[in-house]
Amino acid sequence: MPEKKKGSLYIASLRLERWPRSLAILIGFAAVFLVNPAGIGSLLTTSAFLKVSLAFVLTWMVSTANYIINEITDAPFDAFHPGKKHRPLVRNEISVKVLLVGWLALVAASLLMAHFFYSRAFILSLGALLLAGLLYNVPPIRMKDVPYLDSTLESANNPIRFLIGWYVLAGPFPPLSLLLAWWAFGNFLMVGKRVAEKKFLTAEESSAYRLSLNRYSVRGLVAFMIFNGLLFLAMFILFAIRLSLKTFLYALPFIIFYLIFFMIKSIQDRDAAEEPEKLLKNPFFAVYTVFLLVVFIIAFWLR
């Protein structure tokens, strides 16, 4: 195989196209202002812009390292997935050793740069993202194979990325209700992904592709999805009340509609549930997302 072609296969294995997920750190960064409006001046500086930009790159690097581990450990199971069976490593077109060298380089570079430019809390948050990837993918722990705990650990990336953004600038620990809300929302999305896998894969494909799917039922997954949606709403309400952001409660009907829309799509549309980013290609969903953002901005302004 030509080196140029093989190089493109290695790049494809890094899943660089998933970079938007690392933008979640911006929510944590902006939340500093949400919790402490008087500190807006410290966020709107050239130094803060450069630090949050580098934090995004470091988060992307660690996330890419996690995808490498996922690529390696999942290869035997991906062979039974109708779409993922075409991945380069599954087809033995690339080397595990080369991928591991790439993983080591990404981890070393990201943690080294974090050491020079950020606080200990930031470094620990970045390390937590790396650790979550290892616990999720690597035997003998491999939480990916444990029903309900699999999505719960995978969605822990949400509050971890939030903390990375939060600690771009040194500060106290964020409100626990906000972290739990963000975690529950992530789990809501992840369980939707499990619903799609359970519903659209055949029994043979699902049992071979993801071991935890054998112990799931669609009804149980939908119930767990509803539980996480309700937990998110409860923590969101608690956060809004405790921080005197009661105007945020006006957004509740729009948030609930947003959750219901995703739940319906996860049951009906396999691609949308397995890759939530694809929902943004839906014109209605994209416009509604922007609308919801505007609602939050107005609610904050009206406080």
Image: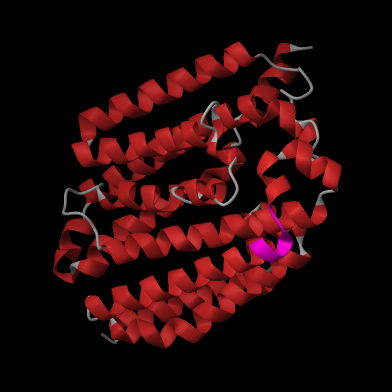
Q: Residue placed farthest to the front in the image?
A: 215
Answer left or right for 58 relative to 65: left
Residue at the image position 35 percent from the left and 44 percent from the top: 53
Q: Position of residue 36 (x, y in %)?
A: 18, 67
SS majority, magenta = helix
- Quadrant (top left/top right/bottom left/bottom right) for the C terminus: bottom left
Q: Residue drawn 57% across and 44% down?
A: 18
In the picture shown, does residue 133 fall above or below 219? above
Residue 218 belongs to magenta span: yes
Say whether residue 156 is visible: yes
Residue 289 or residue 41, whichever sits in front = 289
Q: Indicate whether residue 68 is drawn in magenta.
A: no
Lateral position of residue 58 relative to residue 214, left or right: left
Q: Quadrant of the N terminus?
A: top right
Q: Residue at x 37, y 21 (%)?
A: 108
Is residue 23 positioned above or below 232 on the image?
A: above
Question: Residue, x 53% and y 69% (percent of image)?
Answer: 227
- Decide if residue 82 is in sight here: no
Q: Is residue 2 depicted above or below 84 in this figure?
A: above
- Of residues 197 and 253, the one drawn nearer to the viewer in this rendering: 197
Residue 149 in percent (x, y) is at 52, 48
> Is 240 on the left or on the right of 103, as rendered?
left
Instruction: Report the label total.
Output: 0
- Which residue range is magenta in the image? 216-220
- Front-most of residues 39 and 77: 77
112 vs 130: above or below:
above
